[in-house]
Amino acid sequence: MSVASSIALPELAAAREPRRRLGIAILVGVMVVATVFGQLVSLFFPEGDGGHYTYASIEPTRTFFRTWLILGAVNLAIALPAFALATWLLVPARGWIAATIGACLTWFGGALYAVGVGGIATLYYFGADPAALDATAGTRLLDHLDDSFFAVWGPAIGGAALSGIGQVVLAVALWRAATVPRWVPILSATIVLTFVLPTSGIVGFFVELPLAISGLGVAWYLWQRYLGSNDLAAQPAQA
């Protein structure tokens, strides 16, 4: 290596540092906003009529239904990749294989989840449009959609399951890396509860609260590692 090259490398690293710090700050900000909004999505997610999306329950609030579900889909498309990337950055060595697998599953599953939710929002919005279908035809269509649950909700459910598995694998990676306190991956693994418990309304808010806390924890320790005054990269976090 020439003398000029040896001098250029530190200068190049110094030039990249502000951009790296800005990127981490943006990532942390996105995670915090997406986590908070995700809790609001759960709290105000349309529950339909006894768990069924009927014409009578969708038509009066069809604009809110579509808008809220699309916003929820956008939040999924942003939050899940951000969380996966942040976890990846917190697993520098031990556990990196699990982090890579978990991140890929979360990214792919999150994309499928978001597309599925967005499609459902549009389908029900136009199915309950009185300008296109009268009440009888709209009711028949939405009843058919309700009877075809897995055909309609299949992509969203498949994406949710895939991203959920990915988040569990990411939790394992964080546990093995020991770069954050143990409570962070433990709370992150509570994603499995969303497979069997309601995720909408006040019950859903509290079901997903541990996962939200873990997301904020990941954001905090990512900030501390790359932007804080203490260098956490050199040593594992204490439980």
Image (cartoon, grey):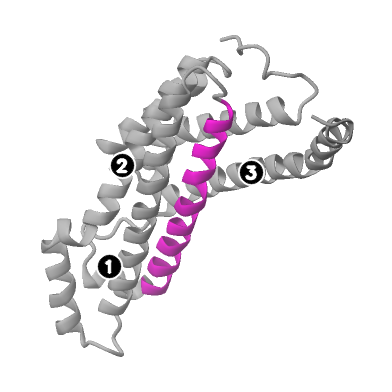
Q: Mark 3 points at which residue?
A: 27
Query: Residue 74, relative to residue 100: is it above or below?
Result: below
Asked if the magenta segment contains residue 80, the reply would be yes
Measure the C-alpha gap from mark 2 to mark 3.
Answer: 23 Å
38 left or right of 18 in image: left
Outermost residue on the top side: it is 238
The earlier-in-sequence mark between 1 and 3 is: 3
Q: Mark 2 points at which residue?
A: 162
Q: Which amino acid does label 1 sit on?
A: Ser
56 left or right of 98 in image: left
Element carrying mark 3: helix
Q: Where is residue 150 shown, x and y percent of the image?
A: 16, 56
Residue at 44%, 56% in the rendered image: 72
Residue at 39%, 56% in the rendered image: 114
Q: Residue 57 — which label?
A: 1
Characterize the local packing of mark 2: few (<14), some (14-19) or many (20 or more) Cα atoms within 10 angstroms.
many
Decide if residue 85 is in sight here: yes
Measure the C-alpha gap from mark 1 to mark 2.
Answer: 30 Å
Front position in the image: 46 or 223: 223
Q: What stretch is highlighted in magenta?
A: 62-90
Residue at 43%, 26% in the rendered image: 97
Asked if the magenta segment contains residue 71, the reply would be yes
Element carrying mark 1: helix
Characterize the local packing of mark 1: few (<14), some (14-19) or many (20 or more) Cα atoms within 10 angstroms.
some
Query: Residue 159, relative to residue 239: is it above or below?
Result: below
Characterize the local packing of mark 3: few (<14), some (14-19) or many (20 or more) Cα atoms within 10 angstroms.
some
Q: Where is residue 158 shown, x and y percent of the image?
A: 25, 48
Front position in the image: 135 or 39: 39
Query: Residue 204, relative to residue 40: is it above or below?
Result: above
Outermost residue on the front side: it is 2
Q: Where is residue 224 shown, x and y percent of the image?
A: 71, 26
* Quadrant of the rendered image containing residue 68: bottom left
